[in-house]
Image (spheres, rainbow, N blue to C red):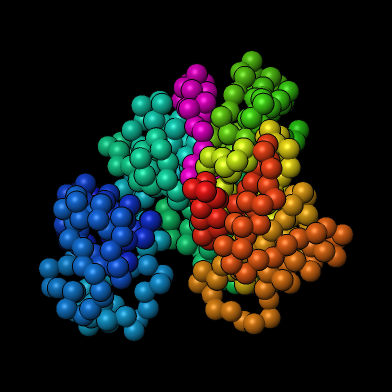
Amino acid sequence: MYQINLNKPCTVYFMGIGGISMSGFAQLFHENGFTVKGSDSQESKITQHLASLGIHIIYGQNAENITDDIDFIVYTAAIHPDNPEFAAAVKKNIPMMERAAMVGQVMKNYKNAIGIAGTHGKTTVTSMLSHIFLTAGKDPTISVGGILDAIKGNIRIGRSDNFITEACEYTNSFLKFFPTAEIILNIDADHLDFFKDIDDIRHSFQEYAKLLPADGVLVINSEIPAVKEITDCFQGRTITFGLNESAEYSAADISYDDNGCGTFELLHNGTKTGETIQLNVIGVHNIYNALSAIALSLHYGIPMEQIKQGLAAFSGTERRFERKGSFHGVTVVDDYAHHPTEIAATLQAAQKYPHKQLWCVFQPHTYSRTRALLKEFAETLSHAEHIILTDIYAARETDPGDISSRTLQEEIQKLGKDALYFSSFEETEKYLLENCTDGDLLITMGAGNVVNIGENLLKK
């Protein structure tokens, strides 16, 4: 495996440089003095920004793009061996690595390499931790899977030994990482187009825990079933968080303000610390998220006052219960939730948000996930007062022909709950304009392009 040394700049080529993660790391290498080039299928705001920094962007992926001056190549999972650039690089024997392996190599350049993992909440906790480290003057390098206002994007290049990144389990990507500290937020059945079952997923997280060095630290949710199967994989420092009595860090006297944002008293080993934590994000799931960030921050010696300031300054990331605006007195919120556990957390949080009636427009994400978790989706969605379904967002998959949003609609109806399905966004928007009333709350929900519905309504 090619070894990346950020102190020895060379020439790197990114295949698929316009992706949200790839573009961030292209910028990181550029700011560390590397000569960065890359290709993508089409021009975008991201590629335009990279070009404005002096990064050479090529549109179209052709063999002649791969020149002899390139020292190593990074490619996305969407690039296959039959890609002309990939084939040319193999022919020239240029070192190549997939994106996750590149992130792992970058992590090896930092003394404190923090990987935030879990089926849900990675972006939020990465953002919370980033706010805390920034408030504390830790000057971290940050890679986050969403747009974070505090860093005006998804990447921040710091000049310290601190690196903070999301660690995704899909295709076992995080097993290519080299973390010195880990947070494991939760472990649920997801990505069943790759994993065989929940046991297969749990095994992946066990392998992730094994990556930690002996002097590393593991921060983990004590409410994960059979959590010792995970913690026993690592013999170093383990810190637990949760709302049960066994957690090292927990919360008491939880309350919510008029906007649903939580406040709680911090407990350490069941004893009140005298610290009151006030959040600027809603829902009980964000109390769990905050506890994990607090636990790791305290491990690094960050003063409690700076931790509280950092958390109070965090008001969320793009597409995580993001208030988009209002039309005709109807509040529009957008949320990335695309798994039953995430939907349940979002709808529970919405109940604490001021509203008359709750409307949920849900766009299922991938056929495989919809099929595997059909009953769970139906049950969680049934807690909304009004449910509207759009077509499944295929993402990386092709339509198998045996699962659709109508299937989910029928499953919801079996529970005695009404659900509507519209085949187009235009029909959905027309219905909402005619039926939502002043004081209602509308949530567009899913990992696809369902956000467009709310944004279109705000223009009317």
The residue lying at 34 percent from left, 84 percent from top is 82
Percent position of residue 407, x then y: 74, 72
The residue lying at 85 percent from left, 65 percent from top is 414
Relative to 114, residue 188 above or below: below
Q: Is residue 349 visible?
A: no
Q: Is residue 227 left or right of residue 30?
A: right
The residue lying at 72 percent from left, 55 percent from top is 387
Q: Where on the picture, by quarter, is residue 295?
A: top right
Percent position of residue 415, x then y: 85, 60
Quadrant of the frame with the N terminus: bottom left
Is residue 368 within the magenta segment? no
The magenta region covers: 301-321
The residue lying at 41 percent from left, 38 percent from top is 149
Percent position of residue 205, x then y: 58, 57
Q: Nearer the viewer, residue 112 or 293?
A: 293
Q: Is residue 44 visible?
A: yes
Percent position of residue 54, x then y: 16, 53
Q: Is residue 439 left or right of residue 446?
A: right
